[in-house]
Amino acid sequence: MEFIVGYPKGSPLVSDYLANKDQVADFFGRSFLSVGDFQSKAMEVDGRFGRAERELAAQAVLVPPGADEARLEAFVEKGGYMVTTGQQPGLLGGPLYNIYKAFTAARLAAELEERLEKPVIPLFWVSSEDHDWDEAGHTEIIGVDNKIHRIELENIYSETDPPIHRIQIGSAAQDQIDEFVQLLPDTEFSSHYIKLILGSFGPEKTLADGFHLLLQELLGRFGIFFTDAAHPSVKAHSGRMLLEELARSEELEAILKRTGEGLSLAGYELQVPLLEGGVNLFLEGSAGRERLYREGDGFRLRTSGEHVTLRDVKERQAEDPLILSPNVLLRPVVESGVFPTLSYVGGPGEIAYFAQLGEYFQAHGLEMPVVYPRCGVTLVEKKIRKILDKFKLRMEFLQKPFHEVASEVAREGMPNEVEEAIEGLRGSVATCTEEIGQAVSSIDPTLNAAAAQVRSQTLSALDELERKTLQALKRENQIGLNQLEKARLHLYPNGKPAERIQNPFYFLTRYGGAFLEELYDSLEVSL
C-alpha cells in the first residue's frame, strides 16, 4: 500500500499559512516552521505552569492501554509540555483523519521533545460536550460489496440537543452496529477488531465512551494520551475561566470583531461567523445545550428563549459543572488554560478559525499555541494503483463527478482519425457557411439568417454524432470504466477525499495493526 502524505487543501487563508506568507503572520503570531517560535512559546508556557499547575494538568489526562504512565510523571517532574489535537466523538471512530490528527501530534511531540530536551506529551482532546448529533452519530465505510455504506444511529433526542456525553447509545442501535460488522471482510484480523467494536459500543455506553475506548485501544501504543471536554478535572480547572467569559462577554466580543475586521480587510473570510450579542458559551437548558446571548441585564438561551442572570448561571454551574461549556472559539483558550500547550494540530477549518483568536487569547492572559497543520494521507491500495497506472491517470482526476470522468476517458480513447474528421468538418462548416452567408446576403440580406441556421443545424448534428460515438466507446470499454469507478470510490467516495469519509476499520480488518505502524512511520514533521 502507498501512503501519499501532504497537507489537506483549505481556504486561501490556510494556503497562505501553509506557504508561510507574511500577510498571515500577524494573525497567527508564530510560525509552525520556526524552532525559535516553539522555544519562545515554551518560555511563555513556563511563565504560567509550574510543578503544581502541571500536576493539575496531569490529573485531567487519561492513560490509554499501551501508553507509559511514567511519561506523565516525567512530564510533571521535568517541566514538560503538550502538543494537543482533538475531535468530537464519531460513531465507530469516525473517519480516517482522526487518526491522522493523533499521529501528527505524536510525531510533532517527539520532534519537539528532542529539540527542547524536555518531555512533550501528545494529547487528544475528545470534544464530548458537542451536540451536533448529525455529524457525530454516523460513519461511512466501503463494504465487502464494494459500495459505500452510511451507518447512522437514530437521534432519540430529535426535539432537543443535549451534549453527546449525556446520550447513551441504547439497545436500539445494536442493529446498526451489527450492520457495520457485516460489512467487514472475514480475515485473520477481523475477529479482534469486531470484538473491540462490540465491546466499545454496547447499549450502556455513550457515543463518547465508545469513541474513547476505540481510539485509546488503537493509539495508546503510539504514546498518545487522551482527555475529555467533560472530564471532572477539566471542568474544575476551567470553571472560573468560563464565568469570566460570561462576565466580560461584551468586551471579548468586541475583540473578536476587531480581529475579524482585520481578516476581512486582508481579503480573508471568517471561518466562524460572529453573531451580534452571542456569548462564546453554551448552557444546558430545556432545549438541550443552548447558546447564550446577551439580553438586558442578563442572558437569553437561544432555542428555549429562557432568560438567566449571571448569578443564575453561577448557581447552576456550582450544582453541575458540566452544564456550562465553551463554544468552538473559546474551547482552544480553555485547553491552553488547563494544559501547557505548545502547539495545536489542526485541519484546514481549525487553522482558519485560529486566525481569529490571537488577541482573544491575549485578553485571557494567554498566548496562542503554535498552530501545526495535520498531515493528510491518501491511501492507495495495490489494486487501485494498478487501475491508475492502466489508464495513466493522476488521482486528482477522479475527484470529478464520474460522468465527467467517463466522458473524458472515452474521449481519450477516440481514434485520432475520427476526432480529426469531426474537428475538420466543424471547421469546414464554420468557414463555408460564413462564406455562403456573405454571398447570399448580397442578393437578399435576410438570407444570411438562413445560412446561420444551416450552420447551427449542421454543428448540432455533428455534436450528436460525437456524443453517440463517445457512448459507443463507453459501452465498448465498460469493464475499464467499472474499474475507474471502483478507484474513484476508494480515493474520493462521494467526491470527497477518503480521509474525510472512510472509516479506519476498512483497513484494519484487511491489514491488521501493521497498517497503523506503517501509517505512523509514513508521517513526517518539519520545523
Image (spheres, helix red, strand yellow):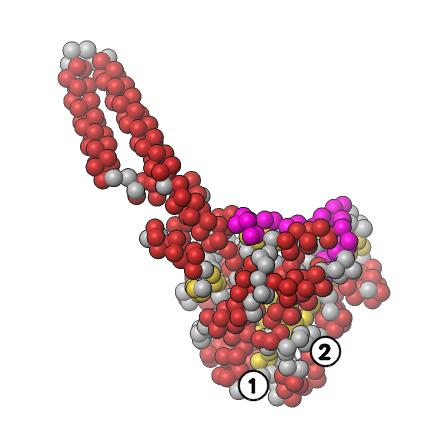
Is 232 positioned to the left or the right of 66 in the image? right
- Residue at 61% of width from left, 66% of height from top? 86
352 above or below 35? above
x%, y% of residue 358? 56, 66
* Total numbered circles: 2
Q: Amino acid at mark 1?
A: Lys
- Residue 103, can we see it? yes
Farthest residue in the top direction? 444
Q: Nearer the viewer, residue 437 or 362?
A: 437
Whether the magenta-drawn stretch holds residue 447 is answered as no
- Residue at 63% of width from left, 87% of height from top? 74
Q: Give the class, few, some or many, for how many residues have Cα within 10 Å of label 2's Cα (few <14, many ≥20).
A: some
- Residue 264, can we see it? no
324 above or below 83? above
Q: Amino acid at mark 2?
A: Gln
Where disc 1 sits, the SS reads: loop
- Residue at 42% of width from left, 67% of height from top? 20
Residue 248 occupies which quadrant of the picture?
bottom right
Residue on which disc 2 sits: 59
- Residue at 34% of width from left, 30% of height from top? 468
x%, y% of residue 64? 67, 74
Q: Nearer the viewer, residue 436 or 389?
A: 389
Whether the magenta-drawn stretch holds residue 171 is answered as yes
Farthest residue in the bottom direction? 77
**CA separation in Å, label 1 and label 2:** 19 Å
Q: Nearer the viewer, residue 327 or 180?
A: 180
Q: Are marks 1 and 2 in contact (CB under 8 Å)?
A: no
x%, y% of residue 203? 77, 57
Choose the circle earlier in sequence order: 1 or 2.
2
Which segment is the magenta one?
143-172
